[in-house]
Image (spheres, rainbow, N blue to C red):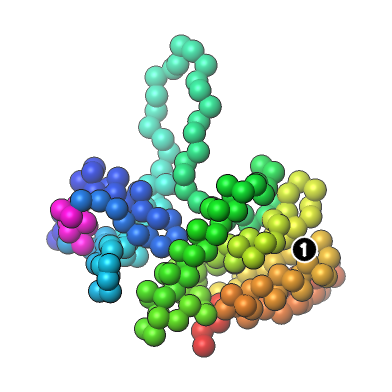
Amino acid sequence: MARPPTAAQRRVVEAADPVTGRLRGTEAQLTALVRCGLAFRHPRPPHDHFLTPAGHRLREAAAQAPPPARAPATTPPEPAAGSGVFAARVGGEEDPPDTGPARAREVHSAWQGLLELRRMTDPHGATDRPCAWERSHLVRAAALALEADGHRPAGADGDGYRVRATPQPEAVAVYGPDGAVLRACAATLERAGWQAGEYTEPRTGRRYVLASPRRV
């Protein structure tokens, strides 16, 4: 049985790119993570190291773990700094959508990283259809494709898109304020390698886009 990762190795895993799983660390740390089954060395130059599915699970578990308890502070705490972890906007978040240049750079970088992940994991190096990570993170993957193409996630005013999970396997629902937004979202997802079509909820009459990652 492989030895559990050390605290230093866990920090390397937790600092991995949230989309591509690319790792940064010493050669000894990366080699040890490979032995633990948490990372692999890509066969193509520059031979970077990336998280395996087990490594992604460890990273996500660490991100969801509650912070350690702290002693009561004697002075008001400073505002918490950003976590530095990118999260695609699915629409309807409590905070107003950030549409500034910094957010645009983050979204662009995340989308380029996702395309690179497609290229690395596809047997033929193709980037025109979703990869395994996207199939296991449907809502986040669809939201990233929409935000990367310039669509605005819904805020408190209700405008913009909302991506939601559905009972159907490998399918998400995209809602919008009107038909024009829905059609534009469907077109974006199709260009990003998804199958998308407009449907109507039978009980409410509400229109939405049902989208699934394309396999071929």
Q: Is residue 181 above or below residue 106?
A: below
Q: Position of residue 174 (x, y in %)?
A: 70, 67
Say which quadrant the N terminus sits in: bottom left
Q: Is residue 39 above or below residue 26?
A: below
Element type at mark 1: loop
Looking at the image, which residue is at 52% across and 79% down? 129
Residue behind mark 1: 176
Looking at the image, which residue is at 51% across and 75% down? 130
Q: Position of residue 143 (x, y in %)?
A: 61, 62
Q: Is residue 78 above or below residue 16?
A: above
Is residue 146 in sight in this rendering?
no
Q: Main secondary structure of the magenta part?
A: helix
- Crowding at dot 1, Cα within 10 Å, few <14 / some 14-19 / many 20+, comes out as many
Give, as a single range, the part of the protein colored magenta. 27-34
Q: Would you identify the image quadrant in which residue 208 lies?
A: bottom right
Is residue 107 in sight in this rendering?
yes
Give the left or right position of residue 93, taking residue 106 as reference. Answer: right
Q: Would you identify the image quadrant in which residue 189 lies?
A: bottom right
Q: Position of residue 213 (x, y in %)?
A: 56, 77
Looking at the image, which residue is at 45% across and 81% down? 126
Give the left or right position of residue 34, taking residue 80 as reference. Answer: left
Give the camera-side residue of 120 and 94: 120
Is 63 part of what is drawn in magenta? no
Looking at the image, which residue is at 47% across and 48% down? 85
Q: Would you identify the image quadrant in which residue 7 lies?
A: top left
Q: Which residue type does callout 1 highlight?
A: Gly
